[in-house]
Image (cartoon, rainbow, N blue to C red):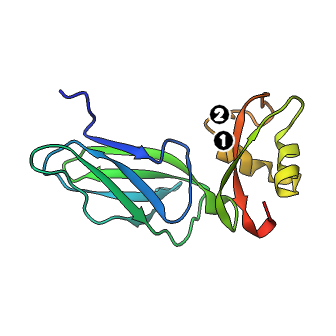
């Protein structure tokens, strides 16, 4: 058994915020076995799929694909690399365009003492009721929206239509 996984998604990392195109990169360590890269929404529906990705007959291969996704019906989803022989890898992601209409990347807010998600949302989006957008984008570190701590680095979707 090798110390390298059969399929390894290196970008995006788990819970990263992605836009369109969805860029995926990694390594395949299964010689001569083709597969595909698929973007799924939170309900498991396919939003986009790549052409064939494969390794060489003598070893591993890096891969990179760029997938155009026309709509994001959910705020979260999964990137899946499926090899035809059965090996696969999955990475949960957050869809920036599923959070805000004019997604243009993400920013980072460092929590200070006394802050709340609704207060941060009011500062960023001018709407305190937009706090769920920040909670979803940080579901890997915020398990209870009422409990955020000084020093936490929270991602938020940049919405160019609101000047954020």
Task: Indicate whether 142 appears above or below 78.
Answer: above
The answer to the question of whether label 2 and label 1 lie on touching residues, with beta carbons closer than 8 A, is yes
Q: Hey, which quadrant is residue 91 in on the image?
A: top left
Image position of 61 (left or right of 105): left
In the rendered image, the residue lying farthest to the left is 57
For residue 80, side relative to residue 144 (left or right)? left
Badge 2 marks a residue whose secondary structure is: loop
Give the residue pinned by disc 2.
141
Instruction: In the rendered view, tell whether residue 89 sits above or below residue 151.
Output: below
Q: Position of residue 163 (x, y in %)?
A: 80, 65
Task: Tally the numbered discs.
Answer: 2
Task: Using a 10 Å C-alpha cutoff, classify the residue at mark 2 as few (fewer than 14 neighbours), some (14 to 19) or many (20 or more).
Answer: some
Which SS class for mark 1? loop
- Is 117 placed left or right of 85 in the picture? right
- Residue 138 tag number: 1
Q: Quadrant of the C terminus?
A: bottom right
* Local crowd size for mark 1, using a 10 Å CA cut-off: few (<14), some (14–19), many (≥20): many
Q: CA distance from mark 2 to mark 1?
A: 6 Å
What x and y, as percent, mark residue 73? 58, 65
Residue 152, x across and y down, in percent: 72, 31
Q: Nearer the viewer, residue 120 or 64?
A: 64
Spot occupied by residue 145 in the image (x, y as percentages of width and height): 76, 37
The quarter of the rendered structure image containing the N terminus is top left
Q: Residue furthest bottom?
A: 70
Q: Which mark is residue 12?
A: none
Locate residue 98 relative to residue 13 in the image: left or right. Answer: right
Q: Residue at x 48, y 60 (%)?
A: 22
- In percent of the image, x 73 and y 62: which residue is there? 159
Residue at image coords 70%, 36%? 153
Q: Which residue sits at x=73%, y=66%?
A: 160
């Amino acid at each position: 058994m090798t110390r390298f996984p059969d399929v390894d998604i290196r970008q995006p990392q788990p819970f990263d915020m992605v836009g369109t195109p969805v860029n995926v990169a990694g390594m395949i360590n299964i010689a001569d076995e083709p597969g595909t890269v698929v973007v799924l929404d939170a309900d498991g529906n396919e939003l986009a799929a790549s052409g064939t990705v494969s390794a060489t007959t003598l070893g591993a291969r890096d891969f990179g694909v760029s997938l155009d996704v026309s709509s994001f019906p959910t705020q979260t989803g999964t990137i899946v690399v499926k090899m035809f022989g059965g090996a696969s890898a999955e990475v949960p992601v957050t869809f920036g365009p599923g959070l805000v209409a004019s997604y243009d990347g993400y920013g980072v807010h460092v929590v200070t003492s006394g802050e709340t998600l609704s207060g941060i949302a009011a500062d960023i989006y001018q709407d305190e009721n937009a706090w769920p957008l920040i909670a979803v984008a940080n579901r890997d570190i915020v398990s209870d929206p009422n409990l955020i701590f000084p020093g936490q680095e929270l991602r938020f979707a940049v919405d160019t239509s609101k000047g954020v």
